[in-house]
Each structure stands twice: as C-alpha cells, then as structure tokens.
Amino acid sequence: MSQCFLLSMAILVRQLFLPFACLYCTTFFSRVMLEFEQFKDALSAILRELGENPGRAGMGKTSQRVVDSLVELLDGYGDSEEELTFFDVPAYDHWIEMHEIPFSSLCEHHLLPFVGKISIAYWPQNGQIIGLSKIVRMLAKFTHRLQLQERMTVELAESIFHRLGSKAVAVRVEGEHFCMSMRGVRQSGIRTITHHRCGAAPHWPF
Ligand SMILES: [Zn+2]
C-alpha cells in the first residue's frame, strides 16, 4: 500500500476518531502527521530551490493537492480482488478480444505519466466467460501503481490468465512516456509497444 495512501487515510481517521484514540494511536497519528508536514516542507524547499515561491497566492494548498493526486493515482495497491462471475457459453471456443482500452499510469523512475491503450484477448476454458467490464476494472489494479510498462504488461497478462483459468491470454500495451516527451530526449509521439502471452493457442490475435 502506498505511503501517501496511508498518510491520507491516517489523517482522515485521526480527524474522525482523535477524541477516542488511545495513547498508541495518538503517537502513531502524530508520527504520520509529522511525516506529512516533512513532506510539505520538502516539496516547498524543492520549489524554492527551483526559483518558485511556494508561499505565493494560488499555491497555499499545492502540497495537499499533490498528496491527494498521488493517493488517487496510486490506488491500485492492496490485495483486494473483485469477485468474478462466470457465464457458461459452451459453444464458444475462440478468442475474445478487447482492443485499445485507454489507460494512464505513472512511471516508477520519474513519477511522470505514461498513457496509451491496452488490448487484451483471452480464450476461455470450457466456454467459461466473464463480463467484459470486469476485465477493464482489473486493469486499474495494475495501472494505478508506480509501474514499468514492460512489467505491467506481464503482470496484467499473468493475472488475467490465472484468475480466469483461461486457455490463453494475450496482452498488448502501447504507451507514450512523458519522461521521454517532456524531459530527457524531449521527443513526443514515440510509442512503446510491449506484448505478453500466456497459455497455448493455435493462433494469436497480437
Ligand atoms: Zn520514466
């Protein structure tokens, strides 16, 4: 679970339950609050070093907004898995393909976004299929973490393969990385394409 998520949850819980908190909890929340204050101080120091005035009008809540953004963008940690309901379609014995599902994620090296499209195909085992929206929801668990596109592609394919018990799974990810387009080589429009396949199939959609 991300530290930012923990921080925000701790702040929220502290505000709600402080009157009832035991000494241990109070100590824990005080430590978390201290870390949060240190984070705000560090962010302000970086901005000042860059020539910005973090105390100027319009930036009073920037530190809090940065934390809130990270909490929202990185809510894919944790072990909770949505219950999957299978439907029986015994006559269906072929690929089910979903093409170009939009996604956004953050690269773990620079905390900058990479965005693009994910195509997923699975070949059901014994006609056991699931609702298509379930697969789209499964994406969030992997895209809402600090990621590398290559690892995300493998994790996604392996997870779908094992959770669905399907004969085969293919995943293709096409992403544009802001750490290449906004900084570094500063070349926009470069698409990075990654693939991963699991299981066995007579032919592959991608
Ligand atoms: Zn990067």
Image (spheres, grey):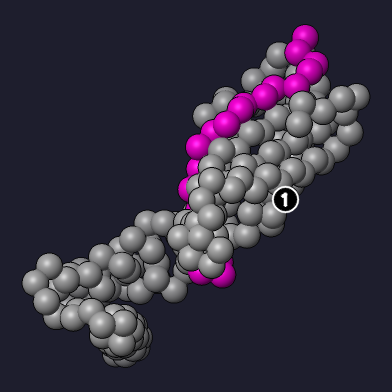
Residue 97 inside the magenta-drawn segment: yes
130 to the left or right of 136: right
Which image quadrant for residue 33? bottom left
- Residue located 69% across and 54% down the image: 150
Magenta segment, prevailing SS (helix, strand or loop) = strand
Q: Residue 172's x, y, as percent?
A: 69, 39
Q: As displayed, is residue 106 above or below residue 135?
A: below
Q: As displayed, is residue 69 above or below residue 30?
A: above
**Residue 36 seen:** no
Q: Nearer the viewer, residue 52 or 104?
A: 52
Amino acid carrying label 1: it is Val
Q: Residue 122's x, y, as percent?
A: 73, 29
Q: As displayed, is residue 102 above or below residue 5?
A: above
Residue labelled with disc 1: 154
Residue 7 inside the magenta-drawn segment: no
- Residue located 68% across and 44% down the image: 193
Q: Quadrant of the C terminus?
A: top right
The residue stretch that appears in magenta: 91-110
